Amino acid sequence: MPVPASWGDAHFTEHGFAQRLAEAGLRGHHYHDLDFWQVYDPDRRIGVQLMRSPDAFPPWEQGAPLRAFLHWEYAARGMRLAHAGTLGLDGKGVLLAGAGGAGKSGTVVAGLLNGLDSVGDDYVLIDLSGGVTARPLFSILKQDQPGFARLGLGRRLGTDRPLNWQGKHAFHINEIAPRPVRASLDISALMVPHISGGKTSSIAPISRKDALIALAPSGIAQMPGERESGFRFFSDLTRLLPCYRLYLGTHPKEIADTIADFLARAPDEAERDHAGL
């Protein structure tokens, strides 16, 4: 196509575009600032991406390449990409949800630097077919400059790398992970980090409603199409897991130890079923 297709701002709504394509059995996304188009046929499993030049993709695409196509394909299989972080120990893990600035990414990095595992920070694949399982899709971690310094990442990774489009340091999980990334984590709880300002960390139960509000909106907004099924999926997820507020202390190792202690004491799925939880 010598001239990319365009859609005037006066008539364009992203949700409306996705709805029109869904009527034809397709999935799609149009980022009009760059005339960047993605269209997917879930029945034929064929996708098309239209862009002005080989590098004319949205800036966030580098950290999670082809995210929309993966989202549509896994959604067709009953799974979902979640905008969430993960931390785990011995195959058992927690899902960390929250808006930007809540401390989610810093918590993941603090855990990795102090012996915990993770299958991803920004986006992970969630499967509800047998409990709640999180699997890795992307390897990029991000930290703003104050967090990068606070966590001591400059000594480990250096400070001479270019910052990403958000002004953050971007690096790969295997650069700081204590072990190779696991194929999956069995998720035993949903946690919503909160920067409390206190010296020590603590964990307290929260309502499923509050947990859903922390988890679903960003996941729905950042994954084009599948809105209705997305809200149903995240509602099911919060019903399957106990939900907590993670009040973050000031020391990375203490935060990691708090989560490790929780995981060591958290009952597995069979014990929860036996206890009627």
Image (tube, helix red, strand yellow):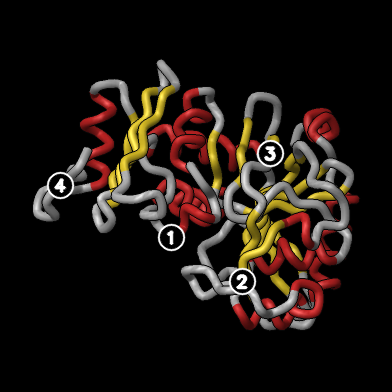
Answer with left or right where residue 55 lies relative to residue 164: left
* Image position of 260 with respect to 136: above or below: below
Name the residue beneath numbered marker 2. 169
Q: Helix, strand or loop at disc 3? A: strand
Answer with left or right where residue 200 lies relative to residue 144: right
The kind of residue tagged 1 is Pro
Q: Residue at x 45, y 32 (%)?
A: 72
Dot 4 alpha-carbon crowd within 10 angstroms: few under 14, some 14 to 19, many 20 or more = few
Q: CA distance from mark 1 to mark 3?
A: 24 Å
Q: Mark 3 or mark 4: which is in front?
A: 4
Among the two numbered marks 1 and 3 on one chain, the one whose residue lies closer to the N terminus: 1
The kind of residue tagged 3 is Arg
Q: Mark 1 or mark 3: which is in front?
A: 1
Name the residue beneath numbered marker 4. 7
The kind of residue tagged 4 is Trp
Residue 26 in the image: state x and y as whole percent: 32, 26
